[in-house]
Image (cartoon, rainbow, N blue to C red):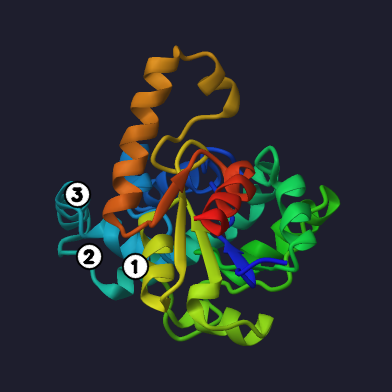
Amino acid sequence: MTCFKAAVFDWAGTTIDFGSFAPMGVFVKAFERFGITATIDQARAPMGAPKWDHIRAMMDMPEIADQWAAKHGAAPTDADVDRVYEVFVPMNEEVVADYATLVPGTVEMVADLRTRGMKIGSTTGYTRSIMERVLPVAAAQGYAPDNLICADDLPEGRPGPIGMYKCFVDLLVYPPEAVIKVDDTEPGIKEGVAAGCVTVGVALSGNAVGKTPEELDALPEDEVDRLRQHATAILKDAGADHVIDTVADLPALIDRLEDA
């Protein structure tokens, strides 16, 4: 047994899709439909937020807002966000399963946590319709968490705590400090902070690094460490209590916390 009752994981960049690639090209292509050029870096910046909020944040970027005004005659409105969102969601549904490979070590990590008596929860910035494509692919690889809270399940999403509160109810776990929230993005870490959980950021598998395992393996160690430190700073600034490379490192972190 352990002093922790549950761990709640993000999906893309945390337990699946090492490097968080699935949404990137889709954001770019969705904006192209409206005559707007967006970059991968711009698409990565708001990652972790509910996808409607993500598109709103991109539209608020001066480079994109100026393009929109020049193309469409006015600054982008919430109604324009709705239009892009309606294009984005089905496009993402079509590709997301292709990026649903588990982060190495996820199955073994979950098995370790379950032997400790911990429950396994999950939250995501994806919609329920997108996650319906992901769940069977993840389950076929051996990963099936005890619950799932999607961006469109509740009236308010990240970075607020409501999704985590629903996890507490679904998993029947409390107090908040007995729950670990694991995420690769600022909104996801802030979600855990707002709920009062122990927060753990994952650096190398996540959005801030944005590389495949093969790409990381090809880099010299000093460059990998530079990327690690860059991601760690972002996660720490968001409020992460601890930062690890990937979820495979979580059992060792729990051991250290319990021995402290």
Residue 199 in picture, x, y percent from top left: 44, 61
Q: Which residue lies furthest to the front in this view?
A: 259
Measured Cα–Cα span from mark 1 to mark 2? 7 Å
Q: Do the residues labelled 1 and 2 touch (CB within 8 Å)?
A: yes
Type of amino acid at the residue the image marks with label 2 = Pro
Measured Cα–Cα span from mark 2 to mark 3? 10 Å
Type of amino acid at the residue the image marks with label 1 = Val
Residue 95 in picture, x, y percent from top left: 63, 47
Query: What residue is rendered at 16% in x and 57% in y?
Result: 69
Above or below 249: residue 239 = below
- Local crowd size for mark 2, using a 10 Å CA cut-off: few (<14), some (14–19), many (≥20): some
Q: Name the residue under label 1.
A: 81
Left or right: 131 with respect to 47?
A: right
Residue 207 in picture, x, y percent from top left: 44, 43
Q: Mark 2 points at which residue?
A: 76
- Upstream in sequence: badge 1 or badge 2: 2
Measured Cα–Cα span from mark 3 to mark 1? 14 Å
Q: Name the residue under label 3.
A: 67
